[in-house]
Image: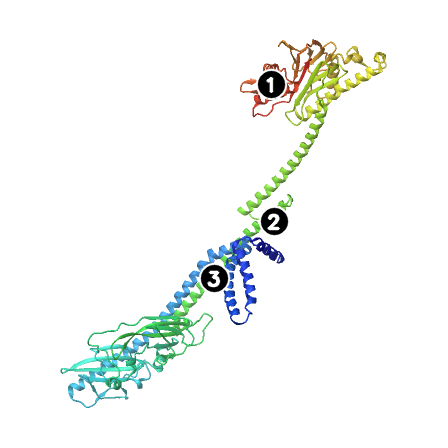
Amino acid sequence: MFEPLKKFEALAYRRLGRTPPQGKLHRTAFWLLIVYLVLGVGRLLPNGGGQTIAGLSFFALCGLIVCSVPLFWRWVIRRMMWRVSNRLVVTYLLIGLTPVVLFVTLALVAAYIFSGQFATFAATSEINRELAQIAAENRAFSVHIAKEIKENPRPKTITVPEFDDGSAMTGRSKMEVAAFLDGQPLALETKPPMRPGMARLPAWLKGSFRGVVMGHGTCFLRAADTQIVDGHTLILMTSLPLEKENLDEIASGLGTVTLVPGIMEEDDKLDDSELDKGIVKKLDVESGEKRPPPPVKFHVGTPPPGQGPVHIQFDGRDVDPGRPEAVSGGLLPPKAHFFDITVAFVAPLQAVFWRTGETHQAFIHVNSRPSLLYQRLFITSLQVAGAIQDILIGIAVFFAVLELIAFIMAVRLNQTITNSVSDLYVATQQIDKGNLSHRIAVKREDQLAALSTSFNEMTASLEELLEEQREKERLQNELEIAHEVQNNLFPRQDVTLSMLDLHGVCRPARSVSGDYYDFLVFGPSTLGLALGDISGKGISAALLMATLHSAVRAYQFAGEELITVGTDALLSPSFQMVKNGLQEINCGEIFESPGKVLALLNRHLYRSTPPEKYATLFLAHYEGTQSRMTYSNGGQLPPLVLRADHGVTRLDKGGTVVGLMDGMSYDEGTVHLRSGDIVIAYSDGVTEPENEFGDFGEERLLEVVARNRHLPLAAISDLVMQALRSWIGTQEQPDDITLVLARQR
């Protein structure tokens, strides 16, 4: 079922020159893209079908985006993070830049909040200062009126003295003054004239009061004082509405200040006459019933469409500072520099609904700039402010220079690391191509430089090892050739006469052997047997063995040639007469005399090899018609004749080793073989291998042969070799092993 889909995927990706997807996420994204493209065509259908397909297409697009995000992230990590330099840069950013960014962000947020708090504090301080001024004037007015009432208990009009023209506020023409004696309003005359105050005295007012009050759809700065005059209660109230002119004074040197009264209750927007008519039910304040202040939420930032610079929620409803109830004043000057941003902040302002006495939250919104706040903070000493500003700028420049130095050092360190890694990568590619002579340039003294030096040393050692390996392979090839040549020197197959069976085997300790054995067939019933051991091992011994083999074969071929030309030629003085010391040897008789052949070979090896080179050699001449074996032993371990009656005869007649001294003669011995007798000729590699129990020895050799004498000679030879391997164990074969067996029929 899925096989056609996989073929389609592979075809599509091959057309795009990309590898077919392997993971489930990759394949899901591929098929979502196909579905989105197909549904994109289906959206062209008329009526409701196109809308339905458009909805499905939207869901397919959402799924494609969800699958593409992790795939894109993997691609970014695989491509951009493959280089070590990119990884180090990201590491430096995470380790070094992230704390700086977090610290700077925290500092900026804290500075912004502090600036906003300071701006609102300055604005509220100005309001509180004006309240204190109004309260002081109201206190003075109340004392004056109390004195007037004391002197004239029933006055028709009371004159209020002039107010202080040195007040921080302008717009005193809008100041309101009202007096109540035992709850009844008094007629007041002010200089300059003031607007008449409140027509009614709220029931909740008991004693003195100073604060921001809300009523008639706006806010007032209001102060009230209570005086007891001859048992009568005198209450004097002075109010100043917070309008643009007053807020201009408050916002002077700060920027713009906006006062948001909050949510005006309907009864606070009505005048006293409407309250008298009973249009709005008053709250029974004396009963103690209080409404809790509604929850307030506000934030500074981008406001919703159609609203002012601050978004405020009061009792679940939006309050817009741009509404008619909000009052703004002041002017925000242009930026003094690039970082002189607008600081917008909102703070709650405690206000009282004058009719009910309830406490509500009004809001004061300030737009300022850091330069204005800085000047206001150091308004008492601008010289100190300039010095502090210079110090802060100097510290910022110093930190910036340190950050720049740290960045340059990080870049330099990054380059040293990435360059070293790049050099190692290039070097490995060169080594992979076979360029072992490539070396990394080391110019520093650090751990990376030590790594490059170690790599160069490793490369040099590898080059030497490969050269040695090539030389070893060349020598091994030459040894294999020598081994093959040497194997051709040994008899290629066992020799069998009508009355004698022969078998020989040679197992070198190394690639080539220094042991020698050969079968020399002179006729249907006559043959020669040779077994030798060259001093040393390896190539030199093998070469001397080849020399000995060629010499013995040369005498064999010379003897055959002499037999061919006849006895007269053998006796002719003009043919080969070999002088051995003072006596002459007839070559026709040499091949029946092993002792004479050993004498000739001794002279040949002595004169053609170094003094330290010699050989042990056993030669025998077998005459089948008489079952007679004539032999001579030149220093070789004596061969053994295992008789059919289990007796043993040692073939030890002869002389010293061959090639060590000149002019040596060798004795001969004769042994007659009977049916079943086995001749055992061997090198020292058969009897001398040892383990913790000692040497293998002649006795074990004779025991193995005697126990298996009824078997073919090749089988007996294999059993002897098996016994030797068991005796040696896991140790390396110490010497060449040569074994020759001959059995009389």
Residue type (three-letter) at the residue carrying disc 2: Val
Q: Position of residue 478 (x, y in %)?
A: 69, 31
Q: Position of residue 90 (x, y in %)?
A: 50, 56
Label 3 crowd (10 A; few <14 / some 14-19 / many >=20): few
Q: Earlier in the sequence, mark 3 or mark 2?
A: 3
Residue 629 lies, with reference to residue 193, above or below; the image says above
Q: What whole-number distance in Å separates the C-alpha atoms at marks 2 and 1?
A: 58 Å
Residue tagged 2: 426
- Quarter of the picture containing the C terminus is top right
Which of these two is toward me, 113 or 597? Answer: 597
Q: Secondary structure at mark 3?
A: helix
State the residue lying farthest toward the bottom.
156
Q: In which quarter of the view is residue 34 placed? A: bottom right
State the residue lying farthest toward the left.
231
Residue 51 lies, with reference to residue 327, above or below; the image says above
Seen at 57% across and 22% down, the residue is: 726
Name the side, left or right, on which 604 lies relative to 416: right
The answer to whether marks 3 and 2 mark residues whose Cβ atoms lie closer than 8 Å is no
Residue 558 lies, with reference to residue 7, above or below; the image says above
Nearer the viewer's eye, disc 2 or disc 1? Answer: 1
Q: Earlier in the sequence, mark 3 or mark 1?
A: 3
Q: Position of residue 625 (x, y in %)?
A: 75, 10
The answer to whether marks 2 and 1 mark residues whose Cβ atoms lie closer than 8 Å is no
Residue tagged 3: 400
Q: Secondary structure at mark 1?
A: loop
Residue tagged 1: 688
Colour setting: rainbow
Name the side, left or right, on which 208 lies relative to 29: left
Residue type (three-letter) at the residue carrying disc 1: Glu
